[in-house]
Image (spheres, grey):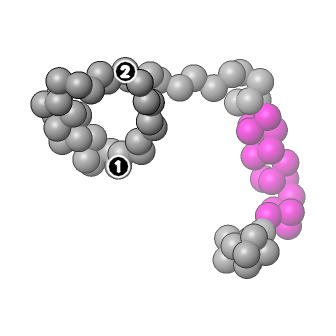
């Protein structure tokens, strides 16, 4: 058996799920992803740090250039 992960836009989710239900060889298992509290705390810490010093942030276009 194979397992795949598919990312579906919110506005297409209902249609996609109805489509899958028409295939008897596909089983659907929906899971909500819960972030651990320590990860949430780290994100909050980084947001606070950026709010306190916006100069540490980089423009998205500049960041994309550095990545490529």
**Is residue 41 visible from the viewing direction of this image?**
yes
Q: Relative to residue 26, is residue 8 depicted above or below?
A: below
Q: Which labelled disc corresponds to residue 29?
A: 2
- Quadrant (top left/top right/bottom left/bottom right) for the C terminus: bottom right
Q: Residue at the location (80% across, 44% down)? A: 46
Residue 5 sits above or below residue 60 on the image: above
Q: Earlier in the sequence, mark 1 or mark 2?
A: 1
Look at the image and give the residue range highlighted in magenta: 42-57
In the picture provided, is 2 more to the left or to the right than 61? Answer: left
Q: How many marks?
A: 2
Q: Residue furthest left?
A: 22
> Is residue 49 located in the magenta-colored stretch of the structure?
yes
Asked if residue 14 can be seen in this view, the reply is: no
Q: Quadrant of the N terminus?
A: top left
Give me the C-alpha separation between circle 1 and circle 2.
Answer: 17 Å
What residue sits 69% from the left and 22% below the top?
36
Describe residue 24's horizontal placement relative to residue 55 as left or right: left
Residue 67 position, x and y percent, is: 75, 70
Q: Secondary structure at mark 2?
A: loop
| Residue 32, x across and y down, in percent | 47, 23
- Point 17% across, 24% down: residue: 24
Q: What percent of the width, then of the height, locates residue 56?
A: 86, 63
Q: Nearer the viewer, residue 16 or 50?
A: 16
Report helix, strand or loop for mark 1. loop
Q: Give the residue pinned by disc 1.
A: 9
Query: Would you call the spot at circle 1 few (<14 residues within 10 Å), some (14-19), or many (20 or more)?
Result: few
| Crowd rating for badge 2 (residues with CA inside 10 Å; few <14, some 14–19, many 20+) | few
**CB atoms at circles 1 and 2 under 8 Å apart?**
no
């Amino acid at each position: 058996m194979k397992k795949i992960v598919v990312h579906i836009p919110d506005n297409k989710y209902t249609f996609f799920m109805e489509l899958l239900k028409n295939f008897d060889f596909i089983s659907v298992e929906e899971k909500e992803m819960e972030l651990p509290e320590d990860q949430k705390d780290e994100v909050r810490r980084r947001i606070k740090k950026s709010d306190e010093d916006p100069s540490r942030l980089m423009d998205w276009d500049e960041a994309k250039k550095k990545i490529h």
